[in-house]
Amino acid sequence: MPPLNHLRQLAELILESVTTLERISQETNAIIPTLDDTDISAPQLFNATAEAITASRVIAAAGIQLAALTRDPHEAMFDTVHEPYKGAALRVCLEGNVSEILRDAGPERLHADEIAAEAHIDGAKLARIMRYLASHHIYREISPGTFVNNRLSAVLDTGKPVDELFAKPESKHSNTSGFAAMASFILGLGTAATTQLWETISNPATAFSSRVLDSALHRAQGLDVPLWVTFEQPGREPARQLFEMVMRAYNNMQPASAVLEAYPWSELQPGSVIVDVGGGVGWAMLPVAKAHPHLRIVIQDSEKVVKDGINNWNAELPEALLSERVTFQAHDFFTAQNVKNASAFFMRYILHDWPDEDVRRILEQLRHAAEPHTVLVILDHILPFTFRDSSFQYTLGNDAPEPLLPTYGAANTMGYLEDVLMMVNLNGKERTVAELETLLASTGWKLKQVQRVEGTVGFFLPIHAVPV
C-alpha cells in the first residue's frame, strides 16, 4: 500500500475514534480532560467503557505511528537515544518534590527560583530542566521560567504536604499509591542497571547465562547475592519498603478487575483456600478478600516481607486477620509447598522474575502439593509477537486495525518493556503463550485457558492450568 494511503488511514482512524469518544461522552457524561487538568483521580472518558478504552488506544497508537512516519528519522532517533536525559531531568523534579511544591501553591503559578528555593537546588538549572520536560508535555511553562502542574506531572504527586516530605524524606512513599516510588526506583537503581546491558550480554562470561547474579543490575551494583536478598539484610528496611511500594504501583497500573476477574472466585465453595505464592505484602489479594469473604487466603513470602504485610493488612483490612480468613506465612517457593488443600495457587508477577529452569522448580513444588481439583492461576504479561498471527486470540481477542501494529504499537508497550526490565534486573523474562504452555506441560500442569480481562495494560492476563 502506498505510504500516503497509510498517512490517510491513520488520520481517519484518529477521526473515527474521536467521534466514538464524543458519543460516549454524551451518553455517559464522562469528562474529556485536557492536558491542563490535574485531577487525575476523577472518572474520565478514556476509561469510561470498554469501547472508550479501545478508541483511546487506537488514537494513541495512530498518533505515535503518525509521528514515526512523518518525522525525519534522524530527528526521531535522536530523541530516542537521548531518552536517558529525559529520565535524569524527571528524577530531579521527582526527588526535589516539584509536583508537590506546585500543588501546595494552589492555582498560583511558581517561578523556578521559588520552586528551587524549597527544594534547595539551583533555580536557573531547574528552569532549564523543567522547560525540557514541558516540551514533552510534562509540566507547563506559563511565562518565562514560571511553571504549573499538568495532567502528566500530577502523577508524580505523592499527595503529602511539602513540609512533611522535606522533614521526613524516609517516609515519602509510605501510604501512597506507589507510583512516585516506582518512578524513584526505576530512575535511580533501574537506570544505572540499563547502562550495563550491552556489557552484560556481550561478555562471554555472562552472555548466555540465565543466572540472576549475571544480570546487568547485579553487574552494575557489584552484588554477590540476589537483589531481594539484599532487602533482607540489616539496615535495608527502607529499600525493602520502597520496593513494596513499587509493587503496589504496578498493581495500581492495572484495573482492579485484573485480579477480581482472574478467576471466578465466587464459584469456590465457602472455606476454599487460595494460596498467594510469593504474594509480597498482599496487595493482589486485598480486593479478593474484600469481595469474597467466604474464602480463606494464605499469603506467602519471606519472613520480613510477611511482617510488613501483616502491618499493611492491619491498616487496610484488620478484620480479615482477626478472623483468620487471611493469614500470612513465611515460605520459600523453591521448597515443598506446605498447603496441601488449596483450591487455587495464585501467582502474580512471580514467574517473570525467573529463568525457565527456576520456573520449573517453582511449578514442580506446586504440582506436588496440588489436589486433583486445584487450579493454578498465573497473572503475568503474556506477550504476542508484533506481527499478525494466531496468538492474538489469547491476548487481545481482536488485534488492532490496519495499518497499526496488531499490538497497538507504542500505545501498549508495557509488557515488552517489562520483558526487557526483567532481563536487565533479574535475568528473568515475560513469556508467550507457547512458552508458558511448554513450561507447564514439563512440570505436570496442563494449560486450560487464557482469561480475557478488559482494560488491562500490556497483555497482563491470567492463565489457568490444572494438574495433568
Image: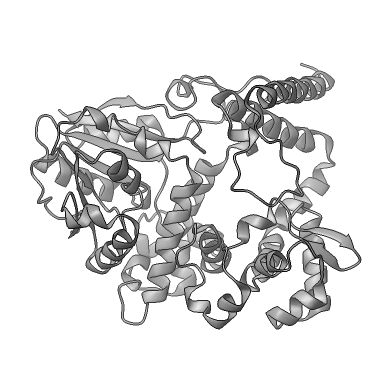
Is residue 246 in sight in this rendering?
Answer: yes
> Which residue appears at 11% of the width and 48% of the height?
339
Q: Which image quarter: residue 22? A: top right
> Which residue appears at 14% of the width and 55% of the height?
335
Q: Residue furthest right?
A: 144
The residue nearer to you, when weighing 188 against 321, is 321
Q: Residue furthest top?
A: 1
Give how far across and how far down residue 126 sits, in percent. 78, 73
Give how far across and how far down residue 308 sits, in percent. 30, 66
Give how far across and how far down residue 203 sits, in percent. 48, 62
Quadrant in which the N terminus appears: top right
Give how far across and how far down residue 14 sits, in percent. 75, 26
Q: Is residue 3 above or below residue 317?
A: above
Q: Is residue 25 above or below residue 103?
A: above
Quadrant in which the C terminus appears: top left
Please give left or right for residue 233 compared with residue 37 in the image: left
Please give left or right for residue 257 compared with residue 13 in the image: left
The residue nearer to you, when weighing 380 against 171, is 171
Please give left or right for residue 183 compared with residue 22 in the image: left
Q: Which image quarter: residue 304? A: bottom left
Q: Is residue 284 above or below residue 1?
A: below
